Image (cartoon, grey):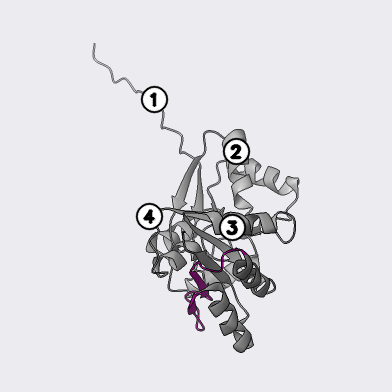
Amino acid sequence: MEYNQTKTISMPKATTRFYVVATPIGNMEDITYRAVRILGEVDLILCEDTRVTRNLLERYQIKTATMSYHAQSKISKADKIIELLNEGKNLALVSDAGTPTISDPGSLLISQIKVACPEVEIFAIPGPSAIISALSISGLSVAEFTFLGFLPHKKGRETLFKEIAASDRVMSFYESPHRIMKTFESLKKFAPDKKVTVARELTKIFEQIVSGSPEEVEKYFIENSDKVRGEFVVIVSAL
């Protein structure tokens, strides 16, 4: 006797994914095709500032919903993100500019996800980074370099400048326009013979590179005080 036997086939469960997506640091054309596709495919985009990210999304006609996540976010916000991942939602993390988790609170979120949701796959969607962009046009040999992020406002600041002065590697860091002149003063004091490269407003309309000794760079910005604005990357040569 012949008969048909129906087999039940179990479909593999789709893997939940979390994407760390680099976005432009200035020029909106500096975003990859892959980043645009991923931002359009995920269920939710986590943003440092939803208003800033919305400008980018509108430029590329991306309709994905957004939710804020930043340094001041409460623990409950991370709990909500983990809950969404456990529900199988695919999420993307972006910062206002550049690569998330680099001098950015996103690094804490990644560590929390790794513990709470070990089955979630985490992917990097590479793209713009202010520090890498600045190093690439500094003219310095950067086979080795140290990145310090944003320097502390007060405690430990002088110690760091002494380390910068003594280092046999290229040292790099971010600085705000409110402290950049004090930075030049410290470099002039502790590392007067080193070469300094300052990259300002990278990829934006007023992009500028200034190089020289700490004294020469400081003199330039004293004489051009209207340039003491925007985002700064400071690179200091090795010994």
- Give the numbered dot on residue 86: 2
Residue 97 in picture, x, y percent from top left: 55, 66
Viewer-closest of 8 and 176 = 176
Which kind of residue does numbered mark 2 sit on?
A: Asn
Q: Are marks 2 and 3 in contact (CB under 8 Å)?
A: no
Question: Are the residues flagged by discs 4 and 2 in contact, CB closer than 8 Å?
Answer: no
Q: Earlier in the sequence, mark 4 or mark 2?
A: 2
Q: Nearer the viewer, mark 1 or mark 2?
A: 2
For discs 1 and 3, the disc positioned in front in the rendered view: 3
Q: Earlier in the sequence, mark 4 or mark 3?
A: 4
Disc 1, SS: loop
Report the residue marked by disc 4: 143
Residue displayed at 45% across by 62% down: 132
Q: CA distance from mark 1 to mark 3?
A: 55 Å
Q: Is residue 201 magenta?
A: yes
| Front in this rendered view, residue 236 or 123 | 236
Which of pointers 2 and 3 lies earlier in the amino acid sequence? Answer: 2
Is label 1 in contact with label 4 (beta carbons under 8 Å)? no
Label located before the other in sequence (1 or 4): 1
Which badge, 1 or 3, comes first in the chain's sequence?
Answer: 1
Depth check, mark 1 against mark 4: the one in front is: 4
**Tag 3: amino acid:** Gly
Residue placed under numbered mark 1 in the picture: 8
The residues bearing labels 1 and 4 have C-alpha atoms spaced at a distance of 57 Å
